Amino acid sequence: MTAICALAVLSCGKGTVVVETPAFAKGADISWVSEMEQDGKVFKKQDGTAADILDVLKEVGINAVRLRVWVDPYGGWSGKDDVVRLAGRAAKAGLALMLDFHYSDFFADPSRQGVPAAWADDTGDIAKMAAHVTAHTTEVLQALKDAGVTPAWVQIGNETRNGMLWPAGQLWDTHGDLPDGWAHFIQLYMAGYNAAKAVFPDIKVMPHLDNAYEDNDWWFKKLRAGGGKFDLIALSHYPQAETGMTAARYNTQAADRVNALAATYGVDIIISEVGVKTQADETAAATVLSGFMTAVTATGKCAGVFYWEPEVYGWWKPAVYSDADAIHRYTGKRETWNSYDMGAFTTDGRPSVVMDAFKE
């Protein structure tokens, strides 16, 4: 694994701020921060001193942030303007940036890959859908460029095991593989890839899958065989969310997969999401995360690890989680959602012992 060269990322009145992309990213996805701050949440350093969230994270070893991008989201959170504002703050703080394009108005993951409402009339036309991907990717990245921010990495899609933008880029359904599923998905993926490279030629572009512990070689083989290009591979890892093995075994298996994928495809692997069950047992969660960091860094093939929304505390949740009508609009189910249970801050807004894994 080699360090990527330094990137000029933010122009300001006093000159150019340069953020060097770390050889190993110790990252955090902090996409909820804007809404949390609006709700009055205060963040503190481990000694209890109130501080900007980015300074708090830097103190515990974080050197990069990840921000998700939605097309037309609830309240504007994780939309283009919110992302550009947060990205600018991260650049000023000297933190490298990963962008995570969902190509949706809400969470895209293995259970849902919702088409943005504004694109819904074009789901039957793969060329038009690809054009939407190109336009959206270009618009967001150009806005960042205009603001003086250069991301180090970009995901094209979020946990796209079964494709993206269903049904246009879906790979299979309950009846089996869909005709042209891979061809259509790869067309959409490459629309994003090419758009990203057009704005930022040196950006590292990657696909993203869930379940880092699984043997995903078949998926990347299909992607590459169909003309899909990637500079890195991004994976998610939630070792305590599974029940088939111990968390320690999931960690070991994920590290083995990192080694295998890197050897097969000649690229480094980045864990763009990790989370542990902090609310259930903080001490055990800290041990699991520390063990995982040790395992993946030992491979020499992991480009970094990003904790997903560590800043959540006090059972905070975004407003959309309490809006049954909105959840129904995005997921087809009329329900409300509980708070995220893997936040890694204490009840008074300080990084918990879980975050010590990033100091090592």
Image: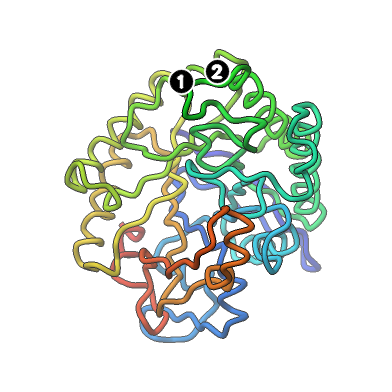
| Element at label 2 | helix
Q: Residues within 10 Å of mark 2 (few under 14, many from 20)?
A: few
- Examine the rendering and report whether any part of residue 153 can be seen: no
Mark on residue 265? 1
Q: Nearer the viewer, residue 339 or 272?
A: 339
Q: Position of residue 71 (x, y in %)?
A: 72, 52
Among the 4 quarters of the image, the one containing residue 308: bottom left
Res. 235 in view: yes
Position of 222 compared to 149: left or right? left
For image coordinates 77% across by 55% down, the residue present is 148
Q: Which mark is residue 224?
A: 2
Residue at (18, 42) in percent of width and height: 245
Count all numbered tags in the image, as a single digit. 2
- What's the distance in space between the residues labelled 1 and 2, CA to CA? 9 Å
Q: Which badge, 1 or 2, comes first in the chain's sequence?
A: 2
In the rendered structure, the answer to whether residue 64 lies left or right of residue 77 reads left
Query: What residue is drawn where x is 58% and y is 79%?
Result: 37
